[in-house]
Amino acid sequence: MDPFSAWLESTRISTAMRDMTWLWPTCESIHFIGLALLIGGAGYFDLRLLGFMRRVPVAAAKAFMPWAITGFAMNFVTGTLFFIMAPHMYVPSAAWWAKVFFIVVAGLNAMFFETTLGTRVMLLGPNEDTPTSFKIVGGVSLFAWFAVLFFGRMLPYIGTGN
Amino acid sequence: MHAWLESLQNSGFSQWVVGSDSIWAYPMILTLHTVGLGIVVGSAAVLDLRLLGIGPGIPLQEMRRVLPLFWVGFGINLVSGVMLFASEAADKAAQPVFLVKLLLVAAGVVVTARLKNVAFDVGIPPAHVRTLAKVSLFVWAGAIVAGRLMAYLK
């Protein structure tokens, strides 16, 4: 085991959490519910950015984003707890690093949208197609979140070095 | 019944799913099942939330558009779920939490199909439609929890 994982797993917080045998399955259940909120809420907005559901004003399609962010927060917290409990499953895992990479891609993509394109959203009414820049942002977001899901679920199976 | 489940579990396909080292076997089917979960519960959740008053700027009629996605996700999970079940048929059939999950999924499908018929008629969803939307959210969350606990409550 790498020294960092060995150290973290020897800490009292990590040991105490592992002793609570119900904690891991509980966090997994929350993690999967959070996943559905995130994919549902963000995916809905991404599809509108891609030009689907044109009768929905783009600004209105953003209504589920607080729920998507709630899902992300649930998964960030439970994901952090998984990491504290068993860092050796993640630190050497290529799938985990790929997952983190795509979370960063999705985050930067959303930040780019909010800071540069976001204000133009309000100007788009119903029945209007979205500009190419919106479509790219929506496509990148949708792809990145499904990649996060893919590498998360594949974590026990690929790039573990076993 | 048990003999049939045993023979299903011992079939060539099932043995490949659980026995193969390929990530195209069990890992990919499991991952497809999770992708489908995200699409099914994600699309049901945005429909339910809209019916409960989130996103009033979205014309209610337009929420019909998520229903085909819901069914695509459901199809993915029906196929991947049957494959996962076949690979461990006798064990899964004997697992109470698996039966709980099946019941919750069936309830979720019935509630969503019912919403399809009653949700889009009027401007503001009436009380019984809002109740159905709340039931849908809880039933799908319950199905997720039951599915996850299948790995623990043997």
Image (tube, coloured by chain):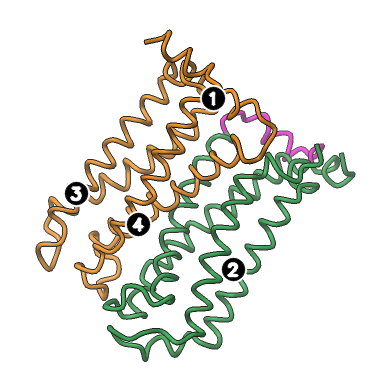
Chain colours: A green, B orange
Q: Which residue is mark 4?
A: B69
- x then y, percent, for residue A140: 56, 71
Q: In front here: A5 or A103?
A: A103
Is residue A86 found left or right of A143 in the rendered image?
right
Q: In front here: A42 or B66?
A: B66
Q: Secondary structure at mark 1?
A: helix
Callout 4–callout 3 Cβ contact below 8 Å: no
In front: label 1 or label 4: 1
Tell me the number on the disc at residue A106.
2
Task: Identify whether B125 is placed above or below B104.
Answer: below
**The residue stretch that appears in magenta:** A9-22
The three-letter code of the residue at mark 3 reads: Thr
Tell me the number on the disc at residue B14.
1
* Residue shown at the point (64%, 25%) measured from the top left: B19
Is residue B152 found left or right of A91 in the rendered image?
left
Q: In front here: A145 or B12?
A: B12
Q: Which residue of the protein is positioned furthest toward the top in this rendering?
A: B3
The quadrant of the picture occupied by the N terminus of chain A is: top right
Tell me whether marks 1 and 4 sit on the same chain: yes
